[in-house]
Image (spheres, rainbow, N blue to C red):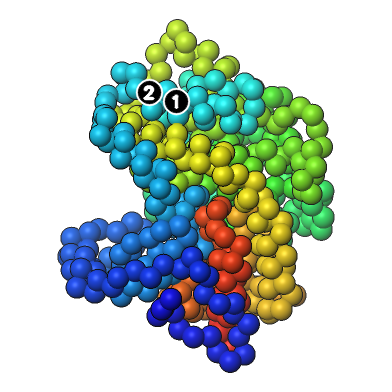
């Protein structure tokens, strides 16, 4: 096959281009027109508009995206970590086409078979036997919004706790819960949110030196926060089961169980945000299931650490049609069995999105996609990234599970000084931008945030593709090291 991917240097150990790499027909004129119209008329998220030079995605298949020149890129980002079964899975495409031919749309108050079946499949996989119903939304932020609304009405309390180093979405409550700089310009201090520190041993806020110490001290800090804020004022604790965009910090064994115990002790609901970590990403259907394990895959307790509400989106249908939702436990459902839930959305449980979810979940089950993510983490990403950490001066730590990994990049391994400062801009941010450029030059789409790059490909990426992408990342790290 032919490819425009630049050739490796003589010293490179890059494996051959995987046989799955596509050979698309270039369409430079079409992509130039799309680009010009985009720049003329599309207002982009989270950006100053003038300096943008967005990538033109002319097409995609499996783990590959190509540009207008027909150049394939291996997607190590799953876009915004949502194409959990890759692009254009034929069974999901067919399910969307069939649903479109049958019934494109229907209002949420009417029963629809795609929605009913999607709800059944999601409840069946929910992290615990106490879950019974699904409230469907259009994406992750509105799932958070509605979960918090449920928790406030269920408890009769208003305040919500969330951790620093987190992302929960871009609607008012969700962005105020968010523990990263995207909150700052949107935070008027009016949403009743209090932030606390979660466990993160590599940059411990608790002067801890072991995971066990970090866990115990983080829980002690959380309990103090609850007590000092006034437990009777707190409706919920919102936690990404594994913080995603903020750095893929796997909670130490016992942390989520400790959160559950604190919630029970103080009458607070636990909202597990599984928008990014759910639907197989971490090698389990939901990442909070790892809370009952010892870090080596062994269950440490027979009882499950169950949240009260679980928010999901992204991977539920691999992002093919916008969909999110809240999985509701019986006890919260009961609150609204004879009392109106004051919330709803025109497109709640949209048939096209739900048909895509049914097909995606069935593909994941039939093709062992979750098990594959777990295996990839243990057999390929874990060992290969540990090797990158050992060989590269700028890789301070690697951490993750399944197909959900972060490389913490540093200027100095001993001091752990981040490669770029927190919330860096301009010149200070140049090294991390250089890493992104070095990846793209080599045909790899990375997921970069702060001083990190994440390895978050489709869960059904082939082993050859995974190894190829890791080799490109290895080269890109070397290239950046050469410039420091
Ligand atoms: N929660 C988490 C953990 C997320 O990662 C995201 C998006 O990245 C959201 C919520 C918001 O989802 P959406 O962008 O679909 O509104």
Quarter of the rendering containing residue 221: top right
Q: Badge 1: few (under 14), some or many (20 or more) residues near its Cα, within 10 Å?
A: some
> In the displayed image of the protein, which residue is found farthest to the bottom?
10
Name which residue lies at 64% across and 22% down.
129
Q: Is residue 109 above or below residue 85?
A: above
- Nearest the viewer among 406 and 218 is 406
Q: Disc 1 designates what residue?
A: 117
Name which residue lies at 43% across and 10% down.
339
Q: Position of residue 407 (x, y in %)?
A: 62, 66
Figure label count: 2
Name which residue lies at 82% across and 48% down.
212
Element under label 2? Answer: helix
**Is residue 292 at all visible to an observer of this figure?**
yes
Mark 2 within 8 Å of ligand 1, using the beta carbon: no
Quarter of the image containing the C terminus?
A: bottom right
Q: Badge 2: few (under 14), some or many (20 or more) residues near its Cα, within 10 Å?
A: few
Inter-mark Cα distance, 2 to 1: 6 Å
Marks 2 & 1, CB-CB < 8 Å contact:
yes
Q: Is residue 390 above or below residue 257?
A: below
Q: Is residue 80 above or below residue 425?
A: above
Q: Which mark is residue 243?
A: none
Quarter of the rendering containing residue 415: bottom right
Element under label 1? Answer: helix
Q: Position of residue 186 (x, y in %)?
A: 39, 49
Name which residue lies at 54% across and 42% down.
364
Q: Disc 2 designates what residue?
A: 113
- Judged left or right of residue 434, residue 127 is right
């Amino acid at each position: 096959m032919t490819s425009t991917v630049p050739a490796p240097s003589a010293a490179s150990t890059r494996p051959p281009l995987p046989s799955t790499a596509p050979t698309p027909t270039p369409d430079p004129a079409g992509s130039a027109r799309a680009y010009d119209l985009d720049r003329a008329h599309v207002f982009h998220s989270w950006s100053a508009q003038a300096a943008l030079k967005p990538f033109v995605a002319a097409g995609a298949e499996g783990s590959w995206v190509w540009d207008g020149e027909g150049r394939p890129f291996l997607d190590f980002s799953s876009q915004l970590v949502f194409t959990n079964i890759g692009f254009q899975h034929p069974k999901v495409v067919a399910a969307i086409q069939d649903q479109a031919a049958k019934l494109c749309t229907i209002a949420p108050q009417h029963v629809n078979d795609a929605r009913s079946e999607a709800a059944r499949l999601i409840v069946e996989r929910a992290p615990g036997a106490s879950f019974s119903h699904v409230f469907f939304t259009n994406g992750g932020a509105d799932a958070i919004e509605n979960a918090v609304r449920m928790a406030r009405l269920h408890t009769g309390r208003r305040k919500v706790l969330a951790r620093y180093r987190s992302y929960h979405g871009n609607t008012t409550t969700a962005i105020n819960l968010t523990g990263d700089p995207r909150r700052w310009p949107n935070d008027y201090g009016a949403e009743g949110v209090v932030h606390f520190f979660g466990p993160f041993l590599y940059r411990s806020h608790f002067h801890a030196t072991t995971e066990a110490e970090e866990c115990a001290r983080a829980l002690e800090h959380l309990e103090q926060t609850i007590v000092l804020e006034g437990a009777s004022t707190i409706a919920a604790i919102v936690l990404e089961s594994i913080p995603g965009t903020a750095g893929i910090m796997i909670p130490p064994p016992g942390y989520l169980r400790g959160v559950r115990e604190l919630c029970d002790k103080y009458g607070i609901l636990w909202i597990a945000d599984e928008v990014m970590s759910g639907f197989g990403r971490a090698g389990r259907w939901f990442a909070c299931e790892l809370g009952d394990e010892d870090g080596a895959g062994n269950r440490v307790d027979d009882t499950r650490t169950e949240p009260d509400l679980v928010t999901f989106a992204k991977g539920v249908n691999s992002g093919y049609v916008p969909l999110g939702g809240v999985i509701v436990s019986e006890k919260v459902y009961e609150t609204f069995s004879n009392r109106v839930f004051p919330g709803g959305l025109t497109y709640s449980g949209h048939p096209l999105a739900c048909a895509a979810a049914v097909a995606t979940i069935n593909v994941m089950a039939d093709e062992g996609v979750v098990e594959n993510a777990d295996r990839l983490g243990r057999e390929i990403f874990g060992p290969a990234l540990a090797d990158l950490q050992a060989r590269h001066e700028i890789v301070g730590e690697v951490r993750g599970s399944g197909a959900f990994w972060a490389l913490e990049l540093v200027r100095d391994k001993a001091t752990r000084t981040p490669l770029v400062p927190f919330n860096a801009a301009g010149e200070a941010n140049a090294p991390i931008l250089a890493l992104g450029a070095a990846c793209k030059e080599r045909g790899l789409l990375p997921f970069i945030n702060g001083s990190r790059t994440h390895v978050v490909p489709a869960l059904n990426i082939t082993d050859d593709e995974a190894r190829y992408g890791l080799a490109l990342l290895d080269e890109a790290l070397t290239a950046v090291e050469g410039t420091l």
